[in-house]
Amino acid sequence: MSDQLPDLAATRLAALCLNRRGRPRGLTFDDHVVRGGLILDLAVCGALTLTDDAVEMDHERAAEIGLADVAAQADEGDGSLQDWLDWGALGFDEWVGRLVQAGVWRLLPWSPLRPFRSYDDGDPARTEADRARGRAGGPDADASQQTLAVLAVGKVSALSGKLGQPPSWVLAGLGEAQWAGELVVERLTELRTRMRTNGHDLDGPAIGDPG
């Protein structure tokens, strides 16, 4: 397992899907959030690139950051990245299971105060910093591309602050991965609208609630 696993955007986004007691918010939409984060992880690391003709996957590069199986799934068959983001088999629960197995997260023991499944994400200070950045909204010249990926997906997923579109400086800061950020943001926005129209519950308790 790659030692980069804790720092991936998908991992940090999954942590934002927990409330402060470590309980998942339990939304179907979070499956899409995790897959969107993984697409951006692949693009930021250079495994997923956009050429004049197509989107190309470098499976060796994906393996270097521990995402060989993710790259294989996203690149399988004739489907597009959007199709995988919509329907991919890997979702929030599967990703969390991987994090627990790798020792990045810890499943917390049952207690009367925690009667539901809950987790220690391993880096609560960074998770709170990600929430704070999402609420601040202003440009952050020191933000890494992984942090910008978290900000982009978090904004369209109501993971920190008010739901909306990420500021232009967030996507521009992704550099050569900007196309992937735009793709994920656009698709998540479409999915959120479609799921609301079809009556799916996307709101749930606010992430800061004690829950």
Image (cartoon, rainbow, N blue to C red):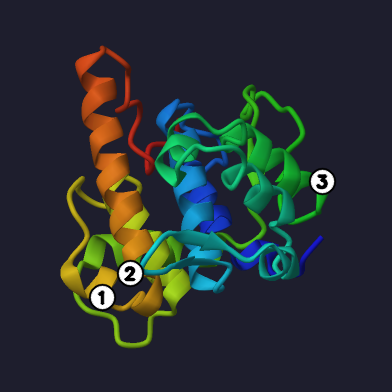
- Quarter of the image with the N terminus is bottom right
Tell me which residue sits at (66%, 23%) in the image. 112
Whether residue 41 is visible, yes or no, is no
Tell me which residue sits at (30%, 42%) in the image. 187
Neighbourhood count class around disc 3 (C-alpha, 10 Å): few under 14, some 14–19, many 20 upward: few
Is 98 placed above or below 66 here? above
Q: Are marks 2 and 1 in contact (CB under 8 Å)?
A: yes
- Quarter of the image with the C terminus is top left
Task: Give the residue at mark 3.
Answer: 101
Task: Give the residue at mark 1.
Answer: 172
Q: Nearer the viewer, mark 2 or mark 3?
A: 2
Determine the secondary structure under disc 2.
helix
Residue 121's disc number: none
Determine the secondary structure under disc 3.
helix
Q: Which kind of residue does numbered mark 2 sit on?
A: Gln
- Image coordinates for residue 55, horizontal then vertical, percent: 45, 59
Q: Distance between the residues labelled 2 and 1?
A: 6 Å
Residue at the outermost front position: 53
Viewer-closest of 14 and 84: 84
Task: Give the residue at mark 2.
Answer: 178
Is 151 placed above or below 36 here? below
Tell me which residue sits at (67%, 58%) in the image. 122
- In terms of sequence position, does the residue under pointer 3 or pointer 1 come before the other? 3
Q: Distance between the residues labelled 2 and 3?
A: 32 Å
Q: Which kind of residue does numbered mark 3 sit on?
A: Gln
